[in-house]
């Protein structure tokens, strides 16, 4: 399958990887929670890990397994687990791998809920140092003997800072640390985290992978880059015959089975369907984002635009090097002083005021008083978020319609 182009592989991957029942071209939605073993020895072997089988659908089921195979293929992993949401994938996996006394280096530019989760694990005794991941020197300075890993997003939301992914990957490899990359903003084929030595790739499937705003889901992919024999938090019980499976086995048992944030089979089917057109949607959204960013950047009512595709973006060259022919489809901007962002949003007719991203439809919201409402003014300043900033998740509409909607609303200012 590796010889096929990206889109070809996407539209045939379910059929090829999972051989659906009855010659179907999609895996079916399989609702059964329990699975029968005709020979009782089978259930014993399954419990003891001597035989791969679905036992109880909190841990594994056919429709979710089919999606996991497709995601694993997409990211080039050695193992993938799905969860009910992106936050469940992040929180459950980290709870499964960390213990009190560990230290993590974490991007200071994080999705708000992930940032909030890092504050929670601090209460469980995990030390966290927030750092500027666009600057490898600062990441290196945050290193301590008990540092277990670095956690970052690729392109941050809302201000679009781009992490120095290549340099951080190199540093993590040298120090035998986990390199955890949230690739929600730039899924393949835009960015392959495996290529910059990422150990674990997190993704909110709710966003671009599913794409249609009708289903929640999350995933963690083990890329196979990390040497789990160097990770001292693994329980002996999960050190299975294949060393490459040690990490994902512990994440499955401690993260998915014990914490229980399982993806529903109906959701797995919806996500798999959305994924078929991933790169077509992404390409169109990225094209629109570039056009819109350029339009806004040249507009007299706009004071500043944040988009990695613009030549004056501080990490434009990093984005050009790391991303595969696009700059993502999130942009933020500030109106000129004195303009009311709420009044501006209310003038938009096509663009939807909503808190989501990666959707087919273009969405906008004021970020400081919503997503970052719980953060202090100092924290927001550190993340580069101004009080009046608007975030746009650019969808797949016809470019001229989008620009016309922005132009009309800007003209009312
Ligand atoms: C949305 C998002 C998440 C959380 O995903 P949910 O599916 O909403 O739980 C995590 N990381 C990033 C970068 C996101 O945009």
Image (cartoon, grey):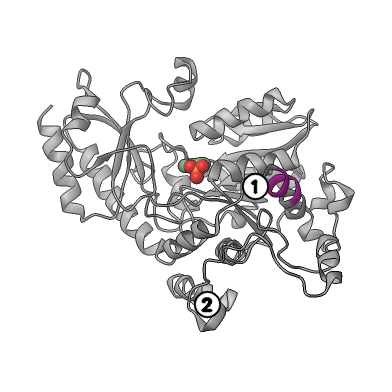
Residue, disc 2: 15
Left or right of 290? Residue 96 is right
Q: Considering depth in this image, is 245 or 223 the residue closer to the camera?
A: 245
- Bounds of the magenta span? 253-258
Residue 404 appears at what percent x and percent y? 13, 45
In the image, 387 versus 207, the foreground residue is 207
Q: Identify the residue at the far right of this view.
A: 236
Q: Quadrant where the N terminus lies?
A: bottom right
Label 2's element? helix
- Would you name the residue on which mark 1 appears? 169
| Secondary structure of the residue carrying numbered label 1 | helix
Dividing the picture into quarters, in which one does residue 333 lie?
A: top left
> As rendered, which of 225 and 215 lies closer to the eye?
215
Q: Residue at x 21, y 43 (%)?
A: 295
Q: Is the CB of mark 1 within 8 Å of ligand 1?
A: no
Measure the alpha-carbon separation of dots 2 and 1: 34 Å
Q: Quadrant of the C terminus?
A: top left
- Name the residue: 29% across, 50% down: 361
Please, is residue 233 above or below residue 225 in the view? above
Q: Position of residue 283 (x, y in %)?
A: 35, 59
Residue displayed at 36% across by 64% down: 280
Q: x, y percentage for residue 68?
A: 60, 62
Upstream in sequence: badge 2 or badge 1: 2
């Amino acid at each position: 399958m590796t010889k096929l182009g990206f889109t070809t592989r996407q539209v045939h991957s379910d059929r090829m990887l999972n051989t659906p029942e009855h010659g179907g071209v999609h895996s079916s939605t399989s609702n059964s929670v329990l699975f029968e073993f005709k020979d009782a020895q089978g259930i014993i072997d399954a419990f003891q890990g001597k035989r791969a089988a679905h036992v109880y659908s909190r841990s594994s089921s056919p429709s979710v397994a089919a999606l996991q195979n497709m995601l694993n293929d997409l990211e080039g992993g050695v193992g993938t687990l799905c969860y009910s949401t992106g936050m469940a994938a992040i929180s459950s996996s980290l709870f499964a791998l960390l213990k009190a006394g560990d230290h993590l280096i974490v991007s200071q530019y994080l999705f708000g809920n992930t940032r909030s989760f890092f504050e929670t694990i601090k209460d469980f005794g995990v030390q966290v140092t927030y750092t500027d991941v666009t600057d490898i020197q600062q990441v290196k300075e945050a290193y301590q003997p008990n540092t277990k890993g670095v956690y970052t997003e690729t392109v941050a939301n809302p201000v679009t800072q781009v992490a120095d992914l290549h340099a951080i990957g190199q540093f993590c490899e040298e120090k035998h640390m986990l390199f955890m990359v949230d690739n929600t903003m730039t899924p393949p084929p835009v960015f392959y985290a495996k290529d910059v030595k990422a150990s674990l790739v997190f993704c909110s499937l709710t966003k671009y992978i599913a794409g249609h705003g009708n289903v929640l889901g999350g995933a963690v992919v083990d890329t196979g880059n990390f040497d789990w024999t160097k990770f001292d938090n693994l329980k002996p019980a999960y050190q299975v015959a294949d060393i490459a499976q040690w990490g994902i086995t512990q994440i499955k048992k401690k993260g998915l089975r014990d914490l229980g944030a399982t993806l529903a089979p109906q959701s797995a089917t919806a996500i798999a369907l959305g994924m078929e057109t991933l790169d077509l949607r992404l390409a169109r959204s990225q094209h629109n984002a570039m056009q819109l960013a350029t339009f806004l950047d040249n507009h007299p009512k706009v004071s500043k635009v944040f988009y990695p595709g613009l030549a004056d973006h501080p990490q434009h060259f990093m984005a050009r090097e790391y991303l595969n022919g696009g700059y993502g489809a999130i942009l933020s901007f500030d109106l000129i002083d004195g303009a009311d962002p709420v009044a501006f949003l209310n003038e938009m007719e096509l663009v939807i005021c909503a808190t989501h991203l990666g959707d087919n439809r273009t969405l906008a919201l004021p970020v400081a008083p919503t997503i970052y409402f719980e953060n202090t003014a100092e924290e927001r300043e550190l993340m580069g978020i101004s009080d009046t900033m608007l975030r746009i998740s650019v969808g797949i509409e016809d470019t001229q319609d989008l620009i016309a909607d922005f132009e009309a609303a800007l003209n009312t200012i």
